[in-house]
Image: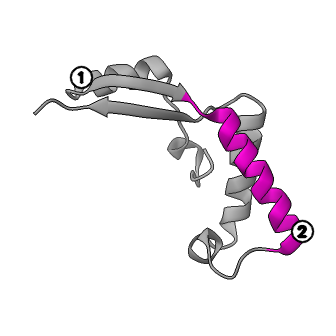
Amino acid sequence: MPWAAAPEESFLATDEDTHLDLTEAGFTMVSLRDTTQENLAAQTALRSKIEAEGPPPLGMHVLVGDRLQQQRTNSYNALRDGRAQMVEIVARKPD
């Protein structure tokens, strides 16, 4: 994953594992929506803007530093190549 500095920090869960983990923690799944294409489009637009205009004066690059460019490239490539997906999960925990 883009935030992992070493292989042992890089792992993903399947939709089924995520559902099971949330259920075991007491949550009820309301929805799980694949947002990969939306994220890929947003990342593509951001990459184009930065290439044309350079980075903004403030942003994540200020906090993360030089590593951010590689993290963004890793994330973009994983989404583009189908090795990862982005999901939006809505879950409720009963009172």
- Counting residues from the N terminus, which is met first, the one under dot 1 or under dot 2? 1
* Disc on res. 24: 1
The quadrant holding residue 81 is: top right
Under mark 2, the amino acid is Ala
| Whether residue 61 is situated above or below residue 84 in the rendered picture | below
Is 66 covered by the magenta stretch? no
Residue at point 66%, 42% (across, down): 39
Query: Looking at the image, what colour scheme do you see?
Result: one colour
User: Which residue is disc 2 drawn over?
Assistant: 52
Judge by depth and name the residue closer to the eye, 31 or 70: 31
Q: Secondary structure at mark 1?
A: helix
Under mark 1, the amino acid is Glu
Left or right? Give the position of 85 relative to 79.
Answer: left
Q: Secondary structure at mark 2?
A: helix
Which residue is farthest bottom?
57
Neighbourhood count class around disc 2 (C-alpha, 10 Å): few under 14, some 14–19, many 20 upward: few
Which stretch appears magenta? 34-54
